[in-house]
Image (cartoon, coloured by chain):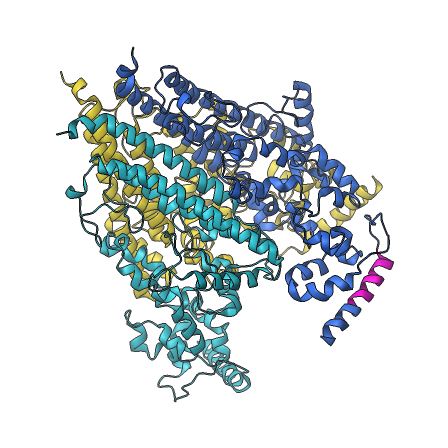
Chain colours: A yellow, B blue, C cyan
């Protein structure tokens, strides 16, 4: 016990010293006398949550005198689960970052999730283990800057982005890791040798994740949209492509960069064209009244109602088999084709993408044949 | 040759010195005069198996005078493939570890495998390339502590566990690596910053892998069982949950830890509920006599005989398509949903788990429809 | 501007010094006076492509006076996309490596790709994002030795090989990473502790990638073939197996190595036997005239014409569902079974391989039943 007390006193002394000499570019705006001093929090938390405490000790925050109550206000507030630290709080010191963040797609992630059918179709009590765990990025800076260490180095690593940008419907992490860019970065850990996610998506430390990169669309759509979902203009597309090429030319010639991105544009077009073929097959079967269960006898789509939905915002629950085949195509496979085109991952563009789309088409056409053979007579009046 | 001999003498001198000063907590019990001295083994093996030799040189064993014959007895015994080093041998020095190991599930891994239908269904001559490569953990301490280096640091790394705990039917490694815990550990390699497998499953260096963590069941069952397969009591469940929370509170508040684990409990319930739905569809078809080939005409299940087996210990060989759909659901997808719930991997809980389960259900229902349409009339008497 | 000029002069001075003292085993053969000196290139490229420039600065090439025009000839040539640096150019200094390279399978990768149906079936304008991105290894040493750093350490890392050897149809990287070999290497980064790809496939720094390892076949075939596709003789097989065992015995006993490889031989046989079963089911349906669309009504196979192709060079485009099931089996699953046998990855041999093959068989048999029930009557004359 004596030892711990000694440590606290020692630590507070260091803190005071650190504060005096701090060469910090983010000096906290409010220097009001704290209602609770840092020693009070530490007296318990150093023992009860040593991992958390140690992370903070090693952080720039600790060195600059930003401690528990600076962000958590007081013990009562900090204990309330509804009162965690929001971006607005971080913005009190990091105002430029907050401003940039608000221009980007991360800042609407939670709101957009809440009106999506996929989210609404998940039992309420388990939503927090599903979509919310990532879409919370709108409300938590520590989605990328892990608490309580808030290390810049960690936040800039592709692995930090990969916490959310992975999996069957948005395998950005997997595409990057299987591209030559990702391989060289993994081998060298040197961002001068190969780009990381942040190099292209939030260049120069920006917090606006809607940077450049067009003509890439958003998500599963074929058009590039702004934060409100409106397709951007051709001029804006061109401007963003130029922004992107500017980044590429750090290592590549302009000609090469342009060529590669235009090649990816072709890949994207080819992918969406295959998807259209799949859509037509499915639509044909629907128009012939052969899908089961019919739309009229299903649970209505949470946002679209009792109507056939193909491609976004199509759901994976309670549909017919042929619709589900199309769902897998548009949601998992088309996205791999075209996004891997821009991420330069041949395994994902071809093996996990294009090949799967061709197999999807075979499956859909055979299913269509079977449905016609099995049920067509019946449906005739 | 002279050089090698010199090295051996030099090495033996160092060994003697190391022995004299060793501050080892695991002093070998038996210090009988060796029949073969270390120099005899080294004289060949340094040249013939240099990798193996070098691993031992760098090991704590070498520093503490534990050498070839300490474990391998003599050259004759060591050459016999049936006489490898068993945990009992390791336990002569590491008795506490052996005792703990015997309380855990690793210590029954081989015996349980040998009576499982999946194992019995694999051609005998290739079994050693399949299940045995991992289940041998019952008989080989070097499953985790790689021979001949026996590095503690390596054995404690998540990658060591991931040698076996991966793949479609138990993607523990993949779940961990896609959780925030796994990401932070990968970024920092610092076990103070984020838990590794051992932090929760064998805390404090224990070798009993059956620690806490309830209400997580074993494998594909919905109930938590003890080593003999008997479901544990509610009281035992509660006690283990408390054990687990104790670990979480190293970094998280008690409230947060409890909330997260209870949320995972809900995820588990929801997953098994979906699985039940799939089971009912399959059972319905079986009861209508529509599965092909019918159970009576198949190879009998190696342990259950000529009966319909749905969920554990269901097999993947020679069943009907609808049973195989259910197999994929219960064996690959349900497990991802609920185990990822406890491992906090949204990609595996949702994308690779819940979504796949919903698609499974669509597939099963459509198959049921087709089977009824195609074969129902026929089966009527 | 002044600073940059200073740097260039400083750099050139260092280059000259480096040249004088270089203890290089690859002294450039031609020391003709350069038409353009290094300063000319650097004056722009240091600023315009700093990443590229920095990579070169850190390379052995820079230290040995091999600079831009040594490989790229002059600015005009370097700008022409059709005139990149070919292996022949590298061979002017690295003649031994070029000679070895030409004996191996990498040296025919592009030519063989160009006559394959899979390649010919991909829209021309996107081919460069698919197969070409890897098969270009025939024409680019920088496929493995990343430009402009050309680091040996990087080229020897499994990740370098994994740039191409991954994905559904050749998951070599995934098999290795899930084997104990791959795990120990990942944990230690020490090639003395565990083999890397190069340890077995291009031992001793050889550039001939067709080394030993038989009786492993090439790709999806069951026989080991030479560069021209001719099966190698039993004697050659035996000789190569001996070559392989030589490598294994660096760490393992000869008995153990032999046993493990022979076990893999059994795994391979068992895998191809299962595949044959699937082929028979598919062939049966084809012979009964039940595949749709029938071969006569399809786009002809680009190299085989209007004929049923099962296994290599079967395609994934526009076939019937039962053929597509067989495609997935032979192209993705058989290969995982047997190649993982030799790579010692239980997850890929069993879970991702053998299990999937058994499920494929169930799917094919059920599909055959349905096709017979649905269409057999119709096809009768």
Above or below — where is B237 with respect to B108? above
Left or right: A96 as drawn, with respect to C377: right
Left or right: A184 as drawn, with respect to C124: right
Q: Position of residue A311 (x, y in %)?
A: 29, 34
Q: Is residue C133 visible?
A: yes
**Main SS class of the magenta portion in the image:** helix
Front-most of A10 and A17? A10
In which quarter of the view is residue B378 placed? top left
**Residue at the top extreme of this rendering:** B381
Left or right: C118 as drawn, with respect to A95: left
**Residue at the bottom extreme of this rendering:** C33
Above or below — where is B296 with respect to A237? above
Q: Residue at image x 47%, y 33%?
A: B332
In which quarter of the view is residue B45 placed? bottom right
Q: Position of residue B206 (x, y in %)?
A: 72, 38
Above or below — where is C97 with respect to B181? below
Front-most of C325 and C171? C325
Residues in magenta, as a range: B11-22
Q: Position of residue A342 (x, y in %)?
A: 34, 52
- Total labels drawn: 0
In which quarter of the view is residue C143 placed? bottom left
Q: Is residue A157 visible?
A: no
Q: Residue at image x 86%, y 52%?
A: B31
Residue A359 colored magenta? no
**Quadrant of the snapshot with the N terminus of chain A:** top right
Front-most of C311 and A172? C311
Q: Position of residue B22 (x, y in %)?
A: 84, 56
**Quadrant of the snapshot with the C terminus of chain A:** top left
């Amino acid at each position: 016990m004596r030892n711990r007390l000694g440590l606290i006193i020692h630590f507070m002394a260091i803190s005071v010293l650190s504060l005096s000499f701090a060469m910090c570019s983010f000096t906290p705006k409010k220097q009001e006398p704290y209602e609770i001093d840092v020693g009070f929090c530490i007296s318990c938390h150093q023992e009860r949550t040593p991992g958390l405490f140690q992370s903070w000790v090693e952080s720039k925050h600790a060195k600059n005198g930003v401690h528990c109550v600076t962000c958590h206000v007081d013990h009562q507030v900090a204990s309330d689960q509804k009162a965690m630290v929001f971006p607005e709080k971080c913005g009190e010191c990091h105002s430029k970052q907050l401003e940039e963040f608000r221009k980007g797609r991360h800042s609407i992630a939670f709101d957009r999730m809440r009106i999506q059918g996929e989210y609404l179709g998940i039992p309420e009590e388990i939503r927090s283990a599903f979509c919310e765990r990532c879409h919370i990025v709108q409300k938590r800076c520590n989605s990328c800057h892990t608490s309580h260490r808030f290390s810049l180095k960690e936040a800039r690593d592709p692995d930090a982005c990969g916490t959310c940008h992975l999996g069957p419907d948005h395998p950005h992490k997997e595409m990057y890791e299987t591209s030559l860019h990702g391989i060289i970065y993994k081998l060298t850990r040197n961002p001068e040798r190969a780009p990381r996610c942040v190099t292209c998506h939030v260049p120069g430390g920006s917090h606006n994740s809607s940077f450049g990169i067009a003509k890439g669309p958003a998500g599963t759509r074929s058009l590039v949209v702004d934060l409100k979902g409106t397709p951007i203009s051709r001029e804006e597309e061109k401007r963003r492509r130029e922004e992107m090429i500017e980044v590429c030319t750090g290592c590549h010639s302009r000609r090469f960069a342009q060529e590669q991105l235009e090649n990816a544009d072709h890949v994207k077009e080819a992918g969406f064209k295959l998807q259209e073929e799949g859509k037509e097959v499915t639509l044909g079967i629907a128009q012939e009244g052969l899908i089961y269960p019919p739309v009229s006898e299903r649970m209505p789509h949470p946002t679209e109602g009792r109507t056939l939905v193909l491609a976004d915002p199509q759901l994976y629950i309670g549909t017919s088999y042929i619709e589900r085949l199309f769902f897998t195509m548009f949601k998992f496979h088309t996205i791999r084709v075209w996004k891997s085109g821009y991420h330069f991952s041949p395994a994902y563009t071809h093996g996990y993408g294009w090949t799967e789309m061709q197999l999807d088409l075979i499956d859909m056409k055979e299913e269509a044949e079977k449905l016609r053979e099995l049920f067509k007579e019946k449906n005739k009046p």
